[in-house]
Image (spheres, rainbow, N blue to C red):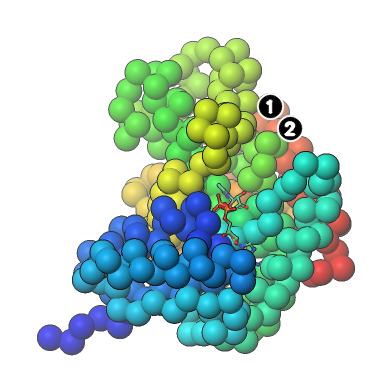
Amino acid sequence: MMSKQPIRVAVTGAAGNIGYALLFRIASGAMFGPDQPVALNLIEIPPALDALKGVVMELDDCAFPLLKDVVATTDMDEGFKDVNWALLVGSVPRKAGMERSDLLGINGKVFTGQGKAIGANAAADVRVLVVGNPCNTNCLIAMNNAEGVPNDRFFAMTMLDENRAKTQLAQKAGVDVTEVSNMTIWGNHSATQYPDFYSAKIGGKSAAEVIDDEAWLKDTFIPDVQTRGAAIIKARGASSAASAANGIVDSVRALTTPTAPGDTFSMCLCSDGSYATPEGLIISFPCRSDGQKIEIVKGIELNTFSRTKFDASVQELSEEREAVKDLI
Ligand SMILES: NC(=O)c1ccc[n+]([C@@H]2O[C@H](COP(=O)([O-])OP(=O)(O)OC[C@H]3O[C@@H](n4cnc5c(N)ncnc54)[C@H](O)[C@@H]3O)[C@@H](O)[C@H]2O)c1
């Protein structure tokens, strides 16, 4: 029997917290399935190379049957060579006293270089998922610098926000999390994101109707989802890593397997002007996949409350684009 060709996956920031939770799940088959071999291209910056060597030793020590090759490098051309997926996790964290615009500028340079290296080296079918924050605008920069790679191959992650929102709604309604569907995060992966409880469904009915507590939905649910990352840091003393890695696995699965009938998933992708948004921005929309092609689901009703929240988040994305306009 002919064995399948490995899917080659680049992960930047591979020695970081999320990397440490993510690589083992990719190598175990959680991302591409139990009969799909994988190869890992692990990309780091020089100060993290020793730590990365330790991670490679641990990958070796798992003897994963599906893991066919591991490349560990600080060289982007080598790191993105022939990759089918590029998971851009690494980025420079915001430090005390740093303005959001400083962060955009510093990371902007990183994602310019990564976009160029992906364009020059990746496989013809490469798809890119940006996780490192600010992920929407980092994705915008990478997309605009990756020569020859179509815009519809670029994504940024709001799956962790979707998963957080689903569990909050399920716990409030006292139902199993699998009862919650159509949980759309609209806009930017930031504190302005809008988790839409009107179009989300619980057991097939509007979550707003089932929960029947608009004050809780507006004043507790929305801010809890928007600021969950900060709450995790406060509780754990470190930022969310395992749940973020799980969001990455769920994102790639959502993009590569057919979406359940009637359901949608949240993904940031290049706007085609849907829902009267500016074309070319990387915006989180309700999406569906047929396993290959991704579409933005049209025709979801946005009431005035939803529209106002979504518009504010898109406005923030327009401002971020303005701040990095020299890089795109
Ligand atoms: N989109 C989301 O839902 C989501 C969720 C959680 C975290 N994040 C973001 O993910 C990123 C990573 O989080 P973490 O907890 O793993 O951080 P971390 O600081 O533990 O790890 C980041 C790693 O990236 C590396 N790195 C930095 N610049 C790099 C570059 N130019 N090339 C390659 N590697 C580089 C660092 O050396 C470090 O090992 C952060 O930006 C965080 O804000 C996004």
Disc 2 on helix, strand or loop?
helix
Q: Is residue 100 above or below residue 312?
A: below
Q: Is residue 271 left or right of residue 82?
A: right
Disc 1 on helix, strand or loop?
helix
Q: Identify the residue position indicated by label 1 in the image.
A: 305
Dot 1 and dot 2 residues touching (CB under 8 Å): yes
Residue lying farthest to the front in this orientation:
50
Residue 170 percent coordinates (x, y): 39, 25
Q: Is residue 212 above or below residue 78?
A: above
Q: Is mark 1 within 8 Å of ligand 1?
A: no
Residue 178 percent coordinates (x, y): 32, 35
Residue 1 percent coordinates (x, y): 12, 86
Q: Is residue 112 left or right of residue 23?
A: right
Residue in the picture at 74% in, 46% down: 95
> For the residue marked with disc 2, what is the amino acid?
Thr
Q: Is residue 324 above or below residue 179?
A: below
Few, some or many C-alpha atoms within 10 Å of disc 2 (few <14, some 14-19, many ≥20)? few
Q: Identify the residue position indicated by label 2 in the image.
A: 308
